[in-house]
Image: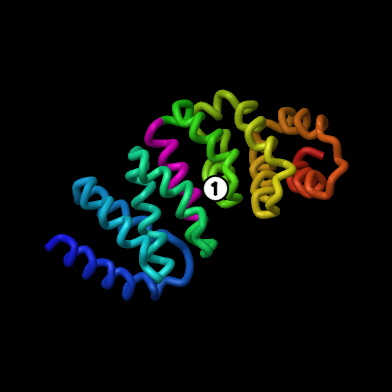
Amino acid sequence: MDDIRVKEYIVSLEKEFSLIENGFKEEEKRAFADYKSNDKEYAKNLAFLAYKSDTYQVRMYGVFLFGYLSEQDDILAFMRDEVSKDDNWRVQEVLAKAFDEFCKKIGYEKALPVIDEWLKNNNPNTRRAVIEGLRIWTSRPYFKDNPSEAVRRIAALKEDSSEYVRKSVGNSLRDISKKFPELIKMELSSWKLESREIKQVYKLASQLVD
């Protein structure tokens, strides 16, 4: 009975959410309400069924749910390995938010091994989910008190093979330069500006400190 009810609910979400062309607030609000008002097993079933939808807005809703459930290892792995393959850029934006939700839930310092693991992942969407999800890094607990730990991790991807990731790296370092200009200046001064990739990131990161 539950499965039928869930499938009917997904169909109703497809009708409702397919009318939303911009933003993510409605999907996020509904996912949070459904997470809060159901037990975790039901919410997990709902998330996986939603993620199978052809309607990208319903997949976004599913990924928000994954974020709320991400303390479960199998869900975190699914986010890392499967959601990162979704070809809709809006779903990738929500993956970044869902990863930040995971870090918030378990604590940013405790999340460091997972942050580092995702940053080394072969899929650029997985790497970008970390860089983009934690923006502004130094407004997050742990990194607020240890800004150099944020800079070190972000800057390690300055020559990333993906332009998508490199832009996120440059923008993230520029964000941090607003509060920690000297730290970013010091980091950038150590770069050898030999490759096109590094020059691109340098240009973005140095906009506020030059």
Does 72 sit above or below residue 165? Answer: above
Residue 166's place in the image compared with 87, above or below, is above
Identify which residue, 54 or 140, lies in the foreground: 54
Identified at 36% across, 70% down, the residue is 17
Q: Residue furthest right?
A: 194
Q: From the top left corner, tell me how far across and down residue 123 is, in percent.
A: 58, 49
Image quarter (top left, top right, bottom left or bottom right) of the C terminus:
top right
Near-viewer residue (82 or 88)? 82
Residue positioned 37% across, 60% down in the render: 51
Tell me where residue 97 appears, x and y as whole percent: 47, 48
Q: Position of residue 138 (x, y in %)?
A: 57, 33
Q: Quadrant of residue 202?
A: top right
Magenta: main secondary structure equals helix
Q: In this figure, what is the number of numbered marks?
A: 1
The magenta span reads 93-106
User: Tag 1's secondary structure?
Assistant: helix
Name the side, left or right, on which 192 lies relative to 112.
right
The residue that mark 1 highlights is 126
> Quick check: is 113 in the magenta stretch?
no
Q: For the point 31% across and 51% down, which residue is it?
A: 32
Identify which residue is drawn at 17% across, 67% down.
4
Residue at the far top in the pictured view: 145
Dot 1: few (<14), some (14–19), or many (≥20) neighbours within 10 Å?
many
The three-letter code of the residue at mark 1 reads Thr
Left or right of 144, for residue 161: right
Q: Is residue 190 left or right of residue 168?
A: right
Quadrant into which the N terminus falls: bottom left
95 versus 137 height, above or below? below
